[in-house]
Image (tube, rainbow, N blue to C red):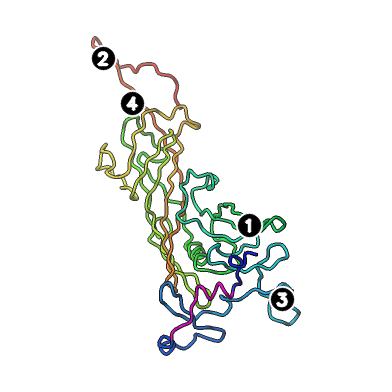
Amino acid sequence: MLRSLWISAALTTSLLLTSVSTAAADDKPPPPGPGYVWACNARIGKCTWIAQELIHTAGPEQGHPAKAGSKKAKRTCQLGAVVQPCSDPTLGNWSNSQQCYLRREEPQPPFSDARWEGHTEGSVWACVREQGFDQGRHLVTKWVWLPGEPDTVVTDPLTLAYRAVAAMQLRAPVVKSAPGVGQIGLVNMPVWLWVEKSENTWGPISRDASVPGLTVTATAQVKAVDWSMGDGKTVRCEGAGTAYRKSFGIKPSPDCGYLYRKTSRDQNGCQYKVGATARWDITWRSTLGDTGQLSMTRTGATQLRIGEAVPVLVDPDGDQAAAPKTPAVC
């Protein structure tokens, strides 16, 4: 058996949380309440009170439903009907729905990787479990894309980080442009692009998520906006862009703009469909000293109608002006 791989949750805890030294024990504050144990993270050299439930060891007796009038039964980690350790220091935390240990890939693969399944937000996770009981036990890995918090049984700092991000309620950017909706721009004339800033659409924004004995603080900020201009071209703007004012005239935007080379005559509705994807950088830190990074995207949209200037022909022998005949436009 791969006893070294499928260790008990109690052994997992002993690997992550070491006994506190006598000196540190003398300095520890009183527990925040009943059911807490004093534990230390050897990797970062910090100690704190941890709720007993966070280092709970799953056992076969937990698979039985709670009897009437008794305490609610704690969730167990199971592969089919077989109880599994809920956490492994190498493989990650157990997911009953995925039937495997989930570990977020670090670093995350590029968006061109097939494991993203075409998505550009969320995370790619390694899903690992033991197979081959009849022909020798071995570990099998597949990769899954998840849009947010993993449904692991153990509530670890990464899970809390996703909960903190969910509490931010990050929104799609509010898209602005000049020319704007209802106006007509011209080919080879500057188009100004910008997004309005708010806590939920641009940041910075911070939120906390907690369980007894553990708190994670996450902070998010948009790092760039990718503009899809509807003509097959994209523009990346590192900032929110500059709002246009009439006093700017026909100058190009100093930090976020575009020039169309063709009219939108052939587009559906005679308008270019423009998308603005805000890319959020998210950092988090736990009260145990663990840190990490996440990335998410939110997309807003608008439409731009682009025409072309029509020259006017003047008869030098008369005072009649006439425009050349052009195909009908939208």
**Which residue is denoted by mark 4 in the rendering?**
309
Q: Amino acid at mark 2?
A: Asp
Q: Nearer the viewer, residue 264 or 312?
A: 264
**Mark with earlier residue (3, 2):** 3
* Helix, strand or loop for disc 1: strand
First in sequence: mark 1 vs mark 2: 1
Expressed as whole percent of the image width and height from the top left, the position of residue 256 reads: 32, 43
Judged from the image, the secondary structure of the residue bearing numbered disc 4 is loop
Where does the image place residue 74, in percent across and percent down from the top left? 66, 74
Percent coordinates x, y for residue 174 in the rendering: 42, 50
**Between 173 and 298, which is closer to the camera in this rendering?**
298
Which of the two discs, 1 and 2, sits closer to the camera?
1
Q: Which residue type does callout 1 highlight? A: His
Q: Which disc is residue 186 wearing?
A: none
Where is mark 3, residue-wise? 61
How far apart marks 4 and 3 lie (CA) works out to 79 Å
User: Which image quadrant: the N terminus?
Assistant: bottom right
Q: Which amino acid lies under the numbered mark 4 shown in the image of this protein?
A: Ala
Please name the residue shown 56% across and 86% down the image. Answer: 34
x 72%, y 82%: residue = 70
Q: Is residue 301 above or below residue 96?
A: above
Q: Is residue 73 magenta?
A: no
Q: Label 1, label 2: how many angstroms apart (C-alpha)?
A: 91 Å
43 vs 71: above or below: above
Mark 3: few, some, or many residues within 10 Å (few <14, many ≥20)? few
Residue placed most toward the observer, 187 or 105: 105
- At x 61%, y 57%, the residue is 139
**Residue stretch rendered in magenta on the structure:** 10-21
